[in-house]
Amino acid sequence: MRRHYRRSGGGAAKQRGAAVAPSAAAMGGQARIEVFGTWDFKWPLGTKIRIAFQQLPSQPSPEEGGISAADFGSAKALVRDRMAVWMAAMKGIELDVEFVEPDLEPPLGEEHSLTDQHRSPFDPVSPRKQPYDVLISLQDLPVTRVDPFQASDRLRIEIPFPDSALGAYARHADYGAPTVYLGRFRGWRENNPRADLSFYLKSAVGVHMTMHELGHVLGLPHMHQHPHLSDARDTHFQKVPDIQAVLARILGEPPSRTLIEDNIIAAWPGNLAFSDWLPVTTREREEYEQKGVLDSIMTHPYYRHLLQKASQAIVPEDALDLPDQPGRRDIEMLHRMYNPDFAVTHDAPLVEPRAGGGSGPSQANPKSQATRRM
């Protein structure tokens, strides 16, 4: 899950990955157009992303499913190891990561206001702040948060699965509010009642989920939501209730309609001229439309079961192809975003974008989409 960008074109400067809409004069006197898709969630080149952990809330005993101090320490080490895998694949990319200490204090808890109970303690008069950019929570999911700056229908948010703010949007969060959730989700815990947090993070699903969310931390979007991958998303995927039923059998509970529409079905707005999307070859698009897979850890392998052509038989979790490494498209995207000298070349034919850069009737509206991503 990731938190989505919401920004329209404009601004005075033109830089890599962002552009201004043409002026009226440049368009032969036509009215200025509004362009969606500029990527303001990218970290500035050369950023060292400071990552901190939030301590766990009060826990029951490990025998009752709680997380011990030793297990918490091991889990943090596993997350650091996963980020090291990303960094090893990012040679030549002007981005770095640093884990900072000490950990922030546990969340305030239910006895505090709805808007603050998920936050570490803070003093609004003279806050003592641990400098960080990204704050990771390892507590069990689901977690309920209230965001007073969201629209009324999105004021109260349940986070049922691992989740991350998208790139530099982590800096928009209040101090002490986690921007990444990597804990055990409910369906997995129910299927593994005696397994601790470290066991989850070392499992195939835990490794994949962690690597996927850390990709969002670096600023990577979902590759399956590339606006040029499909012109018929409404007919490409099964109906939402059918998708919910499939994912409930795999994950142990059904995601909401909003989460499915925002994270799976809808295309991102924008086009190649106003974003860092890599070109898509016709072969890649055909493979995606037929099989629902891409060479990327930023698309969940479950999605292949959500297509109209998909078999209703669900592959057991331990038989799923759960990638644990960044894919070729992930590394190319990171270079496209953070390596000024990168140039992408393709031997295969490229997909011709639709007029106006759209991607069909289900293209997402950035002004109404949720700000969280799976």
Image (spheres, rainbow, N blue to C red):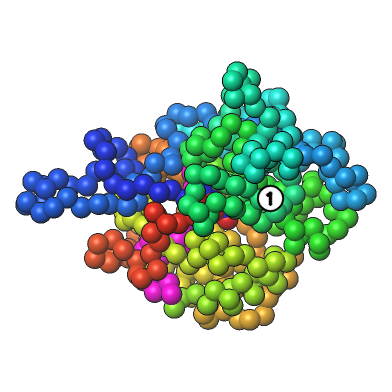
Location of residue 69 in the rendering, given as x and y in whole percent from the top left corner = 84, 36
Q: Residue at x 70, y 38 (%)?
A: 112
Q: Residue at x 73, y 66 (%)?
A: 252
Of all residues shown, which one is farthest toward the top? 126
Judge left or right: residue 266 versus residue 250.
Answer: left
The amino acid type found where label 1 is placed reads Val
Judge left or right: residue 34 versus residue 119.
Answer: left
- Tag 1 residue: 143
Location of residue 79 in the rendering, given as x and y in whole percent from the top left corner = 69, 41
In this rendered view, identify the residue nearer to me: 152 or 159.
Answer: 152
Give the quarter of the figure containing the N terminus.
bottom right
Judge left or right: residue 126 versus residue 368.
Answer: right
In this rendering, does residue 339 appear at all? Answer: yes
In this rendering, does residue 221 appear at all? Answer: no
Q: Residue at x 33, y 55 (%)?
A: 270
Element assignment for label 1:
strand
Of all residues shown, which one is farthest toward the right? 63
Location of residue 189 in the rendering, given as x and y in whole percent from the top left corner = 79, 58
Task: Find out whether residue 227 is within the magenta segment.
Answer: yes
Secondary structure mostly seen in the magenta stretch: loop
Q: Which residues are magenta?
A: 218-234
Location of residue 201 in the rendering, given as x and y in whole percent from the top left corner = 74, 49
Label 1 Cα crowd, 10 Å radius (few <14 / some 14-19 / many 20+): some
Q: Residue at x 44, y 64 (%)?
A: 266
Give the quarter of the figure containing the C terminus.
bottom right
Task: Find out whether residue 42 is within the magenta segment.
Answer: no
In this rendered view, identify the residue nearer to me: 108 or 35.
Answer: 108
Judge left or right: residue 317 versus residue 276.
Answer: right
